[in-house]
Amino acid sequence: MDKKLFKAYIRTIVEEEVERILPKLLSEAVSQVKAVNENNSTPTPVQEKPTLDRSRLAAMMGLEYDGDTIRAMGGSVIGGTNFVDPNAAPPEITNKINRDYSEHMKKLNLT
């Protein structure tokens, strides 16, 4: 059998099979897509947004909240942390914090 004739014969057979099978496959695909769309079209329950409990938030931050006013709580322990006076830091720490770091920033090309 000639090679060109053989290729034409195979092409014809494939086209016939595709024409025979394609409508069935398309209808199955369409039905599956419709089923997925129907499942997705059902409304999902809307979750409620969490409400902000200002008094709990204030307590976590070491504050008192009475509904109208926020005040700092003095000398309390929240979550195992003691609040300390920021002015009670040793002078060597205060000097390092308040030091002028502009020369270092220039050397690092950060300014």
Image: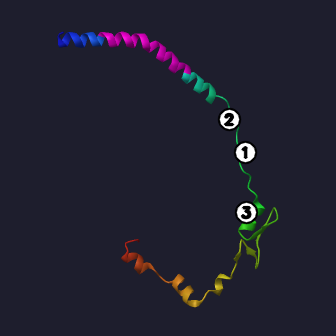
Q: What separation in Å lies between label 1 and label 2 (alpha carbons)?
A: 12 Å
Q: Residue at x 43, y 13 (%)?
A: 21
Give the extent of the magenta segment.
12-31
* Membership of 20 in magenta stretch: yes
Question: For this rendering, which residue is in front, 105 or 59?
Answer: 59
Q: Residue at x 76, y 79 (%)?
A: 75
Residue 17: x and y in percent read 38, 12
Task: Mark 3 or mark 1: name the one nearer the start of the chain.
Answer: 1
The quarter of the picture where residue 56 lies is bottom right
Cβ atoms under marks 2 and 3 closer than 8 Å: no
Q: Please state which of the two labelled residues, at mark 1 or mark 2, is closer to the viewer.
A: 2
Closer to the eye: label 2 or 3: 2
Q: Nearer the viewer, residue 57 or 1?
A: 1
Q: Amino acid at mark 3?
A: Leu
Neighbours of disc 3 within 10 Å: few (<14), some (14-19), many (20+):
few
| Residue at the image point whose x is 34% and y is 12% from the top | 15
Left or right, residue 48 beside residue 4? right
Q: Position of residue 19 (x, y in %)?
A: 40, 11
- The residue carrying mark 1 is 48
Report how many numbered discs are placed on residues in the image: 3
Q: Which numbered dot is residue 57? A: 3
Kind of element beneath mark 1: loop
Q: Main secondary structure of the magenta part?
A: helix
Q: Is residue 29 above or below residue 107?
A: above
